[in-house]
Structure formats: structure tokens, C-alpha cells
Amino acid sequence: MSDGGKGTACHRDVEELLAERGLEVDHVTVYRWVQRFTPLLVEAARPCRHRPGDRWFVDETYVKVAGRWTYVYRAVDQHGQVIDVLASTRRDQAAARRFFVRALSHGHRPVEVTTDKAPVYPRVLDEFLPEACHVDAARENNRIEAEHGRLKARLRPMRGLKRLRSTQTISAGHAFVQNIRRGHYDLGIDTAPHARVTAAFTELTLAI
């Protein structure tokens, strides 16, 4: 996603979809909407969110931001709910600590956490979740690897992320929509899955 106003393939797709419905909105405006309203929608939906499960799968993937590799930490529970995401310029213990602070802020502590064999995770888990069972087998983390693939598929059409903040917003927005579509919010629950996101956003616009 370009921060310079050039737009992206996915934003142009949204622009075309809106045009089909008689709404003339350019891709730059769509981009600004994403940056402005994603945090507001996520916050408005917080009371409707389901409690995370007790088995977490944690890993990080990487994307280029302003030509440099940047890491996106993600956690998914056993039900497929994306618990949280964090974009970071570093892949180290400090970044892992920040991520777990965010993930645990949702008010539930897992009994089991699966990660890869990165050396930072045992130390961070001993600090934040000493009572949890830590599974550090890469083959057990296929669930989160699949989640990374979905995120990268969303980012791939973009011309180039320029700011860490934009990467965080887009990654959080992708997780938010994914969670709504999978039924992890009490939003649009009386709607067919393919229309659940639209119904949820209609409900949320009344709250922001």
C-alpha cells in the first residue's frame, strides 16, 4: 500500500465495486478511509468479540516496508480467531514482549502456546505465561503459517508499504475482517457468512 497516494490494486478493486453501486470514490479516498476508520471499528467491536481460546499458535512473518524487511507477529487460537497482530522493525525479545503484552490485554491467558524454535520465545513465555505449556515444534505451527499466507496474499497486490503504522493498521484490519467472517464477533450473526462483514459494518457505523 503506497503512503504516497498512488493507491493499490486492492483499493482500486474497492473503488470499482463502489462505482458499480453508484458511488464514485477514488482509491486514494478508500486508502484514507482504511487508515482512519479501521482503529475506530476495531474498538467499537471490542465488546462484541468472543473470548479467545486457551491454545495459541504464535509466529512472525515478514513484509517489506519502505524497502526494508519488517516483521508481523500474529497469534491464532485453536478456533481460528486471530488474537492480535504487531508490526515491528525488529525480530527480537523486545518485540516478542510487546506482542505478548498486546495479546494478553484481551483478558485471557492460554494454557498452551505453540511457537517455532526461535530462542526469544522461552524467555518471554517464562516471564508472561510461566504456567502455560510451551510447544516449540515447527510442524505443530501449520495453523499460523496458513494465516501468514492469507495475510501475504492480501498484501501482495500492494505497490509497497511505506510506514510501519500503515502496516500495523492493514494487518489489524485484515485480522478484524477475518474474525468477523469466521463468526468470532456477535455481529452480523443472523446473516449468511458471505454477507456477515457487510452486516457487521452496518451495525458498527451506528457506534462510531
Image: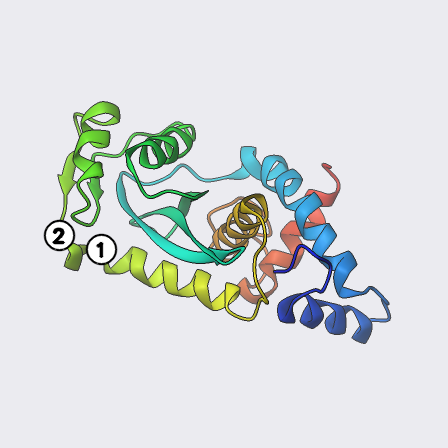
Residue 11 in the image: above or below residue 137: below
Q: Residues within 10 Å of mark 1 (few under 14, many from 20)?
A: some
Residue denoted by label 1:
141
Label 1 SS: helix
Q: On the picture, is 56 further left or further right than 203? A: left
Residue 115 in the image: above or below residue 93: below
**Quarter occupied by the C terminus:** top right
Q: Are marks 2 and 1 in contact (CB under 8 Å)?
A: yes
- In the figure, residue 98 lies in which quadrant? top left
Residue 145 in the image: above or below residue 109: below
Q: 152 or 177: which is nearer to us?
A: 152
Q: On the picture, is 73 further left or further right than 29? A: left
**Quarter occupied by the N terminus:** bottom right
Residue 22 screen position, x and y as percent: 86, 71
Say what amino acid the circle numbered 1 marks: Asn
Q: Spatial distance from mark 2 to mark 1, Cα to Cα? A: 7 Å
Say what amino acid the circle numbered 2 marks: Ala
Q: 61 or 103: which is nearer to us?
A: 61
Query: Residue visible at 55% across and 33% down?
Result: 47
Q: Residues within 10 Å of mark 2 (few under 14, many from 20)?
A: few
Q: Residue furthest front?
A: 67
Residue 176 screen position, x and y as percent: 53, 49
Query: Residue visible at 24% across and 60% down?
Result: 142
- In the figure, residue 4 lies in which quadrant? bottom right
Residue denoted by label 2:
137
Q: 8 or 182: which is nearer to us?
A: 8
Label 2 SS: loop
Q: 40 or 72: which is nearer to us?
A: 72
